[in-house]
Amino acid sequence: IAALCVAAFGLILPAMQRPPLCPCGTIKFWHGVVESSENSQHIADWYSFSHVIHGFLFYGAAHCLLSSRPALARWALPLAVLIEGGWEVLENSPIIINRYREVTMAFGYSGDSILNSLCDIGWMIAGFFAASRLPVKVTIATAIAFELFTLAMIRDNLTLNVLMLVWPVEAIKTWQGLG
């Protein structure tokens, strides 16, 4: 069912006029330049760490909410894929693209390629499976390490991304622009 959800998002995104691949004409495993037209166009980038953390969070929520209901627990991954895919659709809508441009460090952001969006779902799935196998303390430590690492490397992370999208802080935007 999770695979069918991924396939559905693979059909929705082209209907939204998202480019299948980076307009640059190449496919890279890693693209590490945030202020670039190739950001969010390839398989992995600095924001892939955030998608892994999404998987950690979705697994944690499912474990807390569904562990006492084994019949429902099997729906945890499809539900996580549905939420992550829904975010990818919303993130690539004009309202969110424009919001990122207005209030975050994502100057010139034009949305994700379909490849990147589907890989973001894949990174979330990887985080979900990792959280299902790792001790809770290791999962939490990894999430914190990812947040601190991306903060140090690009002055952005999941926490700041959500904060700036929901409640922009001009001082943070200025600080992020110094990098």
Image (cartoon, rainbow, N blue to C red):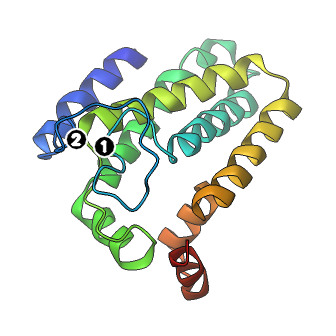
Question: Which corner quadrant of the image does residue 155 belong to?
Answer: bottom right
Q: Mark 2: few, some, or many residues within 10 Å (few <14, many ≥20)? A: many
Answer with mark 1 or mark 2, whichever residue precedes in sequence. Answer: 2
In this rendering, is residue 37 above or below 13? Answer: below
Kindly check if marks 1 and 2 are in contact, taking CB atoms under 8 A apart as contact.
Answer: yes
Q: Residue at x 54, y 87 (%)?
A: 170
Question: Which corner quadrant of the image does residue 167 belong to?
Answer: bottom right
**Label ID, residue 22:** 2
Task: Left or right? Give the position of 176 relative to 152.
Answer: left
In this rendering, is residue 64 above or below 24? Answer: above
Task: Left or right? Give the position of 78 relative to 55.
Answer: left
Residue with the most extreme bottom position: 170
In this rendering, is residue 78 above or below 88? Answer: above
User: Residue 151, percent across and down?
Assistant: 66, 59
Q: Nearer the viewer, residue 43 or 178?
A: 178
**Label ID, residue 41:** 1
**Residue type highlighted by circle 1:** Gln
Q: Answer whether residue 61 is visible to the viewer in this image.
A: yes
User: Residue 22, percent across and down?
Assistant: 22, 41
Q: Residue at x 38, y 37 (%)?
A: 85
Q: Mark 1: few, some, or many residues within 10 Å (few <14, many ≥20)? A: many
Q: Nearer the viewer, residue 84 or 127?
A: 127
Q: Residue at x 30, y 46 (%)?
A: 89
Mark 1 residue element: loop
Task: Left or right? Give the position of 146 relative to 96.
Answer: right
Mark 2 residue element: loop
Residue with the most extreme right position: 137
Q: Answer whether residue 82 is visible to the viewer in this image.
A: no
User: Residue 172, percent across and down?
Assistant: 60, 79
Q: Residue at x 74, y 22 (%)?
A: 67
Q: Assign the C terminus to one quadrant of the image.
A: bottom right
| Distance of label 1 from label 2 (alpha carbons) | 5 Å
